[in-house]
Amino acid sequence: MITLVVFIAALFLGMPIVFILALGTVTFLVEADITILLDTLPLQLFKSVEKNGLLAIPMYMLVGELMNRGGITDRLINLADLAVGRFKGGLAYVNLLTNTLASAILGSATAQIAVMTRTMVPPMVERGYDRAFSTAVSVAGGMLGPVIPPSMMMIIYGIVSYQSVAALFVAGILPGLVICGGFAVVITILGFFYSYPDDSDRPPLPFWTTLIEGLLPLSIPGAIIFGVVSGVMTPTESGALAAFMALVLGGVLYRKIGIAHIGPILTQVALNSAMVISLIGMATVFSWALTFESVPDILAEAIKSISQSGIVFLLLVNLTIIFLGMFLDGLGVMIVIVPILLPVAESFGIDPIHFGVVIAVSTLVGLLTPPVGPGLYVAMEATGVKMGRLFRAVLPFLVSMLISLAIISLLPALSTWLPAALGLY
Amino acid sequence: MSLLHALDKVIARGERWFVIICASAISMILVAQVFMRYGLSKPLFWAEEIATQLLVFMTFVGLSLLVHNRRLIQLDFIISHLPPKVRRLVTVVNDLAVIGVLIFLVVYSIKWILLQETQLEMSPTTRLPLWYGYAALPVAFILMTYHYVVAALDAALGLDDKEEQS
């Protein structure tokens, strides 16, 4: 009880979460009078960071940083344009499809929103689309990143929950398409109000060059997915291979990455990995301490006294994550919450793969909700649309996202059928 | 005071170089490993172990640099809406609490490493003592404590507000 008070007080006072977890662990062990375990705390911390599975994290961070440096979005836009760009409102769908393709590569929603709003909004405004609407479409499209494979979110969930990354990658595909389909419906419905410009008269693109240039960057996520799903390589090894391919593509072929970029890229990779891995380490230690007093069991009993239904439990989890996600980084919320809630979820008979997909989707909602909403801020900075106007434009997409989340939560088969059919778990 | 700041900056610069070296070494080892295993079928037996140890160092030294850069994930929404004087007080209280946690971690990790049975542990693959890797913890926690002490002093003396203005 004291632990909970300390935890919440420290959280609201703005203490970094890594240290709240350390403080919480110490407080809990003292409160439960098992101080003898304090001596093994450093060992536990070391062991939870010294896992070779965690090596995948810097590798995927590196792939993301290398691909972010440009040279790929233009080619993906042309590829999407080739497919869906030639009718009324075409560019809005091009934006959405490009985001779907880019999510396979970029993996971080905020990074993707930053890149896509900068490249997609100016040409849309030039063609006569509303600026706030164009920005909203780009922001919504960025939501797909953490669901469509290969996704950093799924890799980290796989590590903290001991689930197969291959199964999680595949599990995200159908839910990703549901979200994407929902957004396409929103664009179509909004078309009755905005009257989109007719994009069918634009000059055609050369078919084969566009296709080949677009497919080349897609070979990188393709290699990762193939390596992991076929079981030929571990997630870390396919990450290393993809990083090498990305370096060749960005450095030799597109000439976008030079020696001068290497330092900043590696600093970003190291710091972002350190942020995530230290959080995983501390969260693991915290839940290790909690199990000594069987807190997960007590928590499960408490929730079961409210309702026996797994659906009610998922609803509670979603509401908690959406609320926390309004103020905190989604990845951080997931890392802290999964070790504590996964045992509870399993006692409700919820499949861990399904649970992972639900959590990945619900952490995204926070990116679009004020007051903090990092997704909104990144987009505002890139396009100069004011917060109120942007939020109103994003609102239909947010509603669609919540409907998709409900569908994904209620239909476990949407997440589990494909990986089961491929024999991945 | 300026001496404390100068040392703070020197440490941060050292940490930055250290994590860059770790990140590039990890990347090169893992890429080399893929080519040795799948290209030449001669896997490097030490690759994963060394890379994992480097990752531990990169994580904790990186965490220290994140402390210095004030880039850790935290709930700053409430704090940023407080009046400046209250905010300064809350920051100092916060920093002191973290310093307490860090000192605990420093003391307990040193105690753990100095245990005789810890000193005798050896890696089965590389035959190196395991405490070389364990040392990452106390070293990084000491660096973090230093960053926090400087930051807490700044907040207590109101120096951080001036920095924001300039």
Image: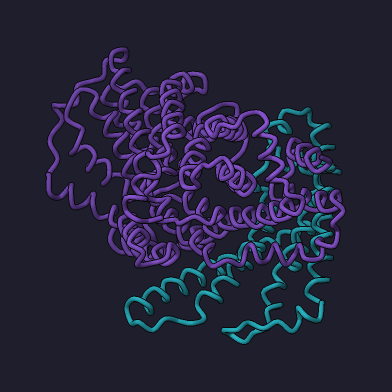
Chain colours: A purple, B cyan
Query: What residue is drawn where x is 23% and y is 52%?
Result: A215
Instruction: Indicate whether A64 appears above or below B129.
Output: above
Q: Position of residue A323 (x, y in %)?
A: 61, 30
Please state, as top left, top right, bottom left or bottom right, where the C terminus of chain A lies in the image.
bottom left
| Figure disc tally | 0
Relative image position of residue B150 (x, y in whole percent)? 80, 53
Residue closer to the observer: A228 or A269: A228
Image-based side of A57 in relation to B91, left or right? left
Q: Is residue A372 visible?
A: no
Q: Say if residue A113 shows up in the picture.
A: yes
Nearer to us in this view, A377 or A46:
A46
Q: Quadrant of the N terminus of chain A?
A: top right
Q: Residue at x 30, y 56 (%)?
A: A222
Q: Quadrant of residue B53?
A: bottom right
> Residue pushed farthest top?
A193
Q: Quadrant of residue A95?
A: top left
Residue at the image point whose x is 12% and y is 44% from the top: A206
The x, y position of residue B24, in whole percent, is 50, 69
Counting from the top left corner in percent of width and height, residue A4 is at 78, 40
Instruction: Please tell me whether residue B42 is drawn above or below residue A160 in the rendered image.
Output: below
Q: Is residue B110 above or below residue A211?
A: below
